[in-house]
Image: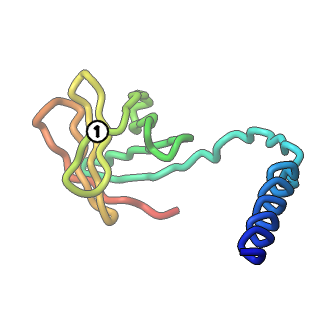
Amino acid sequence: MKYLISSSLIAIALTLTGCNSSPIQSTKPVESTLSTPAETQVINFVGPMDLTIQLKSSDNFETAEMTDNSGRVIHLKAAVSGSGMRLANDDGVSIHFKNGEGIVEFIKDKSISIIEVKK
């Protein structure tokens, strides 16, 4: 019985000691990061009848600016595709490519085959 009471007192003492102590918390200073402008990515394509297309994006092709050799600039945004990358706008203009080959449509459902040119 003496051992039971003394072990109970030790358990209570340890519990009370644990309640009074607080864990040491370390805090790290908040590091500020400077935002840097995204690098512009450019992909060039060629097609029939001397067609050249340049596709530029600064947000990993979530949006892009497509320029053809006539100087026309068309703004596109990412669109759903089964595979590869497809960008389109509400006017029916789109570009869809994968592995260096693709199609461009300046008029909806009028596809033109294109090939990527590495510069």
Instruction: Tell me the quarter of the picture where residue 97 sits.
Output: bottom left
Q: Residue at x 74, y 66 (%)?
A: 8
Amino acid type of disc 1?
Answer: Ala
Residue 18 lies, in percent from the top left, at 81, 57
Residue at the limit of the structure toward the left, as seen here: 109
Residue 26 visible to an observer of this rendering? no
Residue 107 lies, in percent from the top left, at 18, 30
Reading the image, the residue beneath label 1 is 79
Q: Secondary structure at mark 1?
A: strand
Q: Nearer the viewer, residue 46 or 4?
A: 4
- Position of 61 with respect to 47 (left or right) is right
Instruction: Tell me the quarter of the picture where residue 99 sits.
Output: bottom left
Q: Residue at x 21, y 52 (%)?
A: 113
Q: Nearer the viewer, residue 32 or 86?
A: 32
Residue 106 lies, in percent from the top left, at 24, 32
- Position of 90 with respect to 119 (left or right) is left
